[in-house]
Amino acid sequence: PSRGAVDLSWIGDAGASRLEASSGGASLSGLSATASRLRLGVEAGFGGDAAWTGQMRLSGRRDDGGGVSGWGAEWQGALAWSSGRFDARLQGRALLLHTVSGYSDAGVGVSLGLKPHENGTGLSFSLTPAWGNAGALGGLGGGLQLWADDRMRSPGVGSDRALTPQMSWNTELGYGFALGPGGQVLRSYVTSRPNEWSAGLEVIGFRW
């Protein structure tokens, strides 16, 4: 949105997750669980100056499966700053109410980043410390945390720990290489996501 303006829009998303154990002895054989989430709400985008933008979302949602089935309402907010190749983002989320007593889902995170050049080449870096619970339905962990923004996800394991607020650190380092005069770019990257639920997830890959 332009400076001083507020843009309103309808938003919605749906997702599903399935966990199935194909081996692991008699105790796990045949074990499976499914869960889904449907959300519909309104988003307000705020325009500050050229460097600052913000957004706020208020949504209703329906959760099914995994031991938690019911209706709820949630809030999400974000404030972003950008200048040249540098950017920063503060965002948070909270489940305001739910028909399932005692169920909670909340988190807050900060993202600091260095973007590549406009043509996609060069060094890039992002650091995203985040705090919150995994939003796990029945202990299925991050697979049921159906947030669109990966930076806010916190993979949990075990129902008790997944529902307890924890700290996670997501980092990504990348470099883009120009491939000939056609403007194609190959980006190599390494990602690390250590957290209090596990030792972390390290990924090395390429993007075209």
Image: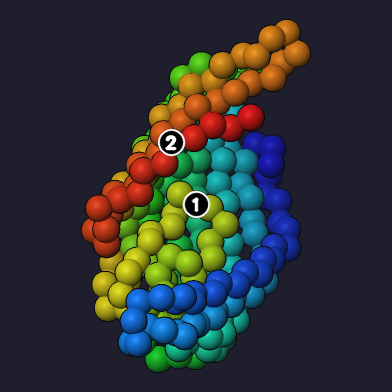
Q: Nearer the viewer, residue 106 or 117?
A: 117
Quadrant holding the N terminus: top right
- C-beta proximity under 8 Å, tags 2 and 1: no
Circle count: 2
Please name the residue shown 71% across and 57% down the image. Answer: 8
Q: Nearer the viewer, residue 30 or 189?
A: 30
Q: Which secondary structure, mark 2? A: strand
Residue 165 % position (x, y): 28, 67
Figure quadrant of residue 181? top right
Question: Looking at the picture, does residue 65 appear above or below residue 45?
Answer: below
Q: Earlier in the sequence, mark 2 or mark 1?
A: 1
Q: Residue flagged by tag 1: what amino acid is it?
A: Asp
Quadrant holding the C terminus: top right
* Residue 157 seen: yes
Q: Residue flagged by tag 2: what amino acid is it?
A: Ile
Question: Looking at the picture, does residue 24 appear above or below residue 57?
Answer: below
* Residue 73 seen: no
Residue 185 % position (x, y): 63, 21
| Residue ID for mark 1 | 150
How far is the residue under mark 2 from the one under mark 1?
17 Å
Frontmost of labels 2 and 1 is 2
| Residue ID for mark 2 | 204
Question: Looking at the picture, does residue 25 appear above or below residue 83?
Answer: below
